[in-house]
């Protein structure tokens, strides 16, 4: 096992050399054995894992660096962000694909600005749990390989236990990485980056005639797919800044994310998102906005003159809402059990409006419909909640399509999601009572979200207060 440093070696301006801090007492709290197996990392000696994944010992071949990036945060451009508390250790292959290993919370870097470079235990555990939940829901995402507690205190309003999470991503190139170099007029680096992204994520475009234009189109396709997955499972990212948008189309940055309980498009939990810029129902529009920022970086690389390039870019950015809606309708038809378009956009909008008006829980409603297939007679409760929509849906299910409908619904509608109150409960048991067992129980349930397991029912209920006072936080 030997790490490569392909990204860091691509151009010296992409990253800066930086060493993780030494910590007092690195202790391995979580080890993702399945992911480690895939990456051939289970061969690392057990007693050394905490040292490796806190940066106390360098993995063979690894040259730790911090990466440069900029970003639009809540609509405002910040030309200088970068890995302020993360170290990219290098890449490892699973035999098919390349994965980057990154430590988060591993100390200050040249990009730390005023930050301490550290991470506390609760957000590290939270990222592990949420990203694994998303992975098993079938949503493209970065993952966590390990969480190591450092034995050092981190000061946030009070002293909190420090931790380091190891994040695994097919790459960490963000829209903000492109913005960093485009803003400095370094189009040679932008081009190198674009070629890197093509080689790593879109290799079929290598010989394409107008390849940077095609790259933008391909990235947009992945973003549409990603957002519709989020809408399918009720995920609210919470901080869709351009520095938190990966060109690989994976979900990244689990700081202030939350799950939707009661269906409402305006749902927002992040404490700093006061105007609801990143509310549940805004996510597709924000994705389009972020893609426009990426387009601005790539336009100079397109074929043809500047005017032509601009027009081409505009056309594909403007086409996003229509494509996203079409994919959304396909996705919602699947949630209702159909691979073909049985229900129109208008019908689906009406159904969702009904959920919103009736203040119904999103996951529970689709679970109830899923379970309803097994009942001969209509469920009066669902009839009351969904009105005519319920009857109209049932009418589409016939003896001949029943099996297919059931299978499609089973594959599309999770029985359990990482509900905000459950996540907070298991985190407080871990931090306050030093008891990781509740966390592990929830994690195990979330690893089979489409199936009933021994403990699933414990985690299917909405919060007693329906998340009324729930708040999430960034950069913790
Ligand atoms: P995030 O909110 O995690 O997307 O972070 C936004 C920016 O703030 C990134 O450049 C991070 O590296 C940086 N950052 C967040 N927390 C810290 C910290 N404790 N120390 C240094 N930089 C940080
Ligand atoms: Mg971030």
Image (cartoon, rainbow, N blue to C red):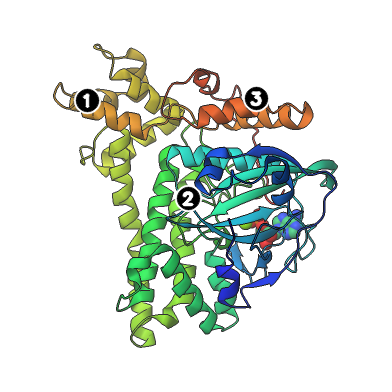
Q: On the image, which quarter does residue 150 sit in? A: top right
Q: On the image, which quarter does residue 427 sit in? A: top right
The Cα–Cα distance between marks 3 and 2, rounded to whole angstroms, is 33 Å
Q: Which residue is mark 1?
A: 403
Q: Is residue 17 above or below residue 469?
A: below
Please identify the residue farthest to the left as the structure is shown: 400
Residue 137 percent location from the top left of the image: 44, 38
Asked if one can make out residue 5 in the rendered structure from this viewpoint, the answer is yes
Disc number lying in front (3 or 2)? 3
**Nearest the eye: 386 or 79:** 79
Q: Which residue is mark 2?
A: 282
Disc number lying in front (2 or 1)? 1
Q: On the image, which quarter does residue 77 sit in? A: bottom right
- Labels 3 and 1: the sequence-earlier one: 1
Residue 413 percent location from the top left of the image: 38, 32
Which residue occupies 62% across, 32% down? 423
Residue 34 percent location from the top left of the image: 52, 39
Disc sitting over residue 438 in the figure: 3
Splitting the image into four quadrants, where does ligand 2 fall? Answer: bottom right
The Cα–Cα distance between marks 3 and 1, rounded to whole angstroms, is 36 Å
Q: Is residue 137 left or right of residue 149?
A: left
Q: Where's the N terminus, which quadrant? A: bottom right
Dot 1: element = helix
Label 1: how many Cα within 10 Å (few below 14, some 14–19, many 20+): few
Dot 2: element = helix
- Labels 2 and 1: the sequence-earlier one: 2
Q: Looking at the image, how many numbered discs can be counted on the residues?
A: 3
Asked if one can make out residue 466 in the rendered structure from this viewpoint, the answer is no
- Labels 3 and 2: the sequence-earlier one: 2
The Cα–Cα distance between marks 2 and 1, rounded to whole angstroms, is 35 Å
**Nearest the eye: 186 or 150:** 150
């Amino acid at each position: 096992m030997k790490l490569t440093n392909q990204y860091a070696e691509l151009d010296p301006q992409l990253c800066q050399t930086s060493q993780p801090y030494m910590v007092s007492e690195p202790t391995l709290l979580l080890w993702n054995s399945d992911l480690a197996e895939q990456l051939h990392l289970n061969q690392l000696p057990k007693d050394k894992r905490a040292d490796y994944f806190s940066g106390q010992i360098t993995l063979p071949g690894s040259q730790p660096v911090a990466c440069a990036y900029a970003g639009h945060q809540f609509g405002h451009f910040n030309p200088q962000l970068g890995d302020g508390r993360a170290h990219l250790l290098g890449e490892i292959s699973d035999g098919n694909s390349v994965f980057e290993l990154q430590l988060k919370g591993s100390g200050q870097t040249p990009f730390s600005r005023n930050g301490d470079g550290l991470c506390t235990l609760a957000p590290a555990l939270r990222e592990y749990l949420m990203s694994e939940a998303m992975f098993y829901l079938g949503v493209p995402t970065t993952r966590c390989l390990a969480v190591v507690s450092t034995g050092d205190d981190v000061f946030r309003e009070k002293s909190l236990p420090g931790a380091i999470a190891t994040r695994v991503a097919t790459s960490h190139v963000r829209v903000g990485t492109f913005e960093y170099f485009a803003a400095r007029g370094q189009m040679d680096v932008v081009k190198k980056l674009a070629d890197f992204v093509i080689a790593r994520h879109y290799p079929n475009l290598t010989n394409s005639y107008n390849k940077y234009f095609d790259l933008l189109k391909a990235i947009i396709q992945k973003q549409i797919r990603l957002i519709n997955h989020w809408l399918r499972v009720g995920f609210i990212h919470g901080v869709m800044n351009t520095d938190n948008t990966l060109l690989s189309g994976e979900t990244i940055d689990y700081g202030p994310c939350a799950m939707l309980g009661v269906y409402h498009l305006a749902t927002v939990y992040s404490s700093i998102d006061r105007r609801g810029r990143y509310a549940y129902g805004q996510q597709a529009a924000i994705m389009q906005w972020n893609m426009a920022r990426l387009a601005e970086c790539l336009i100079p690389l397109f074929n043809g003159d500047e005017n032509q390039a601009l027009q081409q870019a505009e056309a594909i950015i403007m086409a996003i809402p229509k494509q996203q809606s079409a994919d959304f309708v396909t996705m919602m038809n699947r949630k209702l059990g159909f691979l073909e378009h049985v229900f129109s956009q208008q019908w689906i909008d009406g159904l969702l409006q009904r959920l919103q008006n009736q203040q119904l829980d999103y996951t529970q409603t689709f679970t109830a419909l899923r379970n309803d297939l097994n009942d001969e007679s209509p469920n009066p409760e669902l009839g009351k909640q969904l009105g005519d929509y319920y009857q109209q849906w049932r009418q589409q299910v016939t003896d001949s399509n029943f099996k297919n409908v059931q299978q499609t619904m089973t594959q599309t509608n999770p029985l359990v999601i990482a509900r905000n109150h459950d996540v907070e409960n298991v985190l407080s048991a871990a931090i306050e009572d030093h008891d990781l067992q509740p966390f592990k129980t929830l994690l195990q349930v979330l690893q089979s979200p489409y199936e009933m397991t021994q403990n699933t029912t414990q985690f299917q209920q909405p919060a007693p207060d329906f998340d009324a006072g729930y708040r999430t936080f960034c950069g913790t």
